[in-house]
Image (cartoon, rainbow, N blue to C red):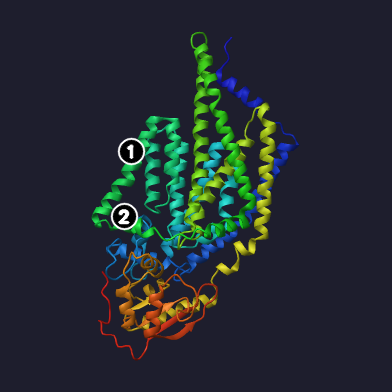
Amino acid sequence: MMNNPVQVEEEATQENRWPDDFGAILIRGLVVLCVLGLAVLIPHVYVRVTEALAHPMLQLDNEEGALLAQAVRVAQGKPLYRELNDYPYLVGTYPPFYLWVAGSLTNLHTPSFFVGRLITALSVFSTGILLFTIVYALTRQIFAALLAPLLFLATFECYNWSAYFRVDLLALALTLSSLALLLGGSEKKWMHIGAACLAALALFTKQTMYSVPVVSLIALWVWDRAAFRRYAVTFVAAAGLPFLALSALTGGQFAVHTIWYNMNRYHWPDLLVWAAHVWRFYRWWLLAGLLAFALLVRELVRSWRPLATIHGTLDAAASSNPVSTAVTSRAEQELLRTRFLLIACVAYQMLSVTNFLSLPKAGSAENYLLEPLAAWSLAVGVAIGYGLRKRTAAQSDSWKAWILLMAFLLALHAVHLHRWEKVIFGEWKRPTPADFEAAARLTSELARASGDVVSEVAAYALFAEKPVLFQPFIMSELARQGRWDESRFLKDIRAGRFTIFASTTDLFSDAYTDAFTPGMREALRDTYRLDRVIQGGHLWQFFLYKPRASARPTLPDTIKER
């Protein structure tokens, strides 16, 4: 009598469960404790997000103001990617999708950070949901699925950047959406197309989101060559055609701004600084992630062995036992799918680390760690979940030992985060009443100015209804590299063109700043005087410079924005 294939599979399932012995109970207990330990830290992120949304007229990050000014320009129909031969000297360092969305929803009469920060907040929530969904879909283990988003959310990087009008978290949410669609629908044509389009959209939000498209192509090459071709053609069309169109419409300036102007100088010793940062906060998670990588690679290698056996079984059974053939064929498909999923997880964890190489670039910050942290959260969650799933008796003991070690390391990570809680989620990142007062005073001073102004914290010029004419860091970086001629700007400083020049550093001192070149500081010293210092709190203090009485502007009072 022939066995029902479904019955055979169910019996095998029962046989392959881990016995509920002390080791399995200990592993589950450690994972649950880790989940609870991380979960109690998440309210810090909630408070930071809600505070940022509640105060949309307060700039929290150096570049928020410039991005808001660019979003307003987009909404006004003004060019974003243009030659830098006249004012405003603004660089479109990012592709346009985030700015298009934020700009189209921003009130141009009273611009604020609210819309962009709301997009960021929704992206943080979406990222957590996507990490949970992917791990649960692959492992069917609820606590492993909860662990992945909690690992990501309970980081300094997520906490810090969840409050900003910046592109990074939207780009991450889009790229994880692409990965989730691909892993959930590896056999469905429309999902390949949708995943490719989402990956292209992520690339048009932040141009360094290349990991998931590459991972998808690698995994699909192994899984199904037709699916590989479908994804590749769709992605090239969805990313390449808009790139060519925007480059053509802007006379090549789209490519210049998003690629050439992003190639800042590198200071490679900074890699050691960032490595120390990762080790300080995430040492136990890093070790657990390396162990997860090794376990997933091991399982991937094992998945290559049985295929020859399965093919042999198919050939032997084909003529005599069609039910056996069906069971074996299904086993082959399941093995191929497992291989596809493992390749995707392993490749994403490995490729995401290349973002670390962007950290020594001038102007880089911890936002380049967001995708690696998400990828490693995913890998750890999958490895834990995979280990907790049904394992054969021969494999259970070895997997149990490794998963127990990984769970122990993650428990240490949760304890370690609590030790560093006041640093990672500390009050020092939150604005104080002095910051609100300083922002209001600076905005008032800029609004009363009779002519053009330059403000390093650009939002307050925008809120004072002044044009944002100069983006300090990136323009100074381009000048240092010889990619932009600063002579026009220096001439205007020496002519006293700007009635107020506001910075966050005393430009008359030797204090370090990369926001202005030595030539700019020298021109300012020659023509301007320090009028006042506005003291702030945790964010900035503002130094206001005004032209000396001897400076007589010979140029028009105001600059016409292009």
- The foreground one among 120 and 211 is 211
Which of discs 2 and 1 lies nearer the camera? The answer is 2
Quadrant in the picture for the C terminus: bottom left
Task: Please tell me whether residue 438 is drawn above or below residue 256 in the rendered image.
Answer: below
Residue that label 1 marks: 233
In the figure, is residue 467 to the left or right of 134?
left
Q: Residue at x 28, y 58 (%)?
A: 253
Q: Residue at x 38, y 60 (%)?
A: 102
**Circle 1 SS class:** helix
> Residue 535 appears at what percent x and percent y?
51, 80
Q: Amino acid at mark 1?
A: Val
> Residue 64 appears at what percent x and percent y?
43, 66
**Quarter of image, res 237:** top left
**Quarter of image, res 380:** top right
> Residue 464 appears at what percent x and percent y?
37, 77
Residue 397 is tagged as none
Q: Are marks 2 and 1 in contact (CB under 8 Å)?
A: no
> Residue 560 appears at what percent x and percent y?
25, 74
Q: Residue at x 72, y 39 (%)?
A: 25
Quadrant in the picture for the N terminus: top right
Q: Residue furthest right?
A: 22
In the figure, is residue 39 to the left or right of 184?
right
How far apart are the alpha carbons under marks 2 and 1? 21 Å
Residue that label 2 marks: 255
Task: Please tell me whether residue 326 is drawn above or below residue 139 in the rendered image.
Answer: above
Q: Amino acid at mark 2?
A: Ala
Q: In this orientation, does residue 185 appear?
A: no
Q: Residue at x 47, y 76 (%)?
A: 505
- Count the marks: 2
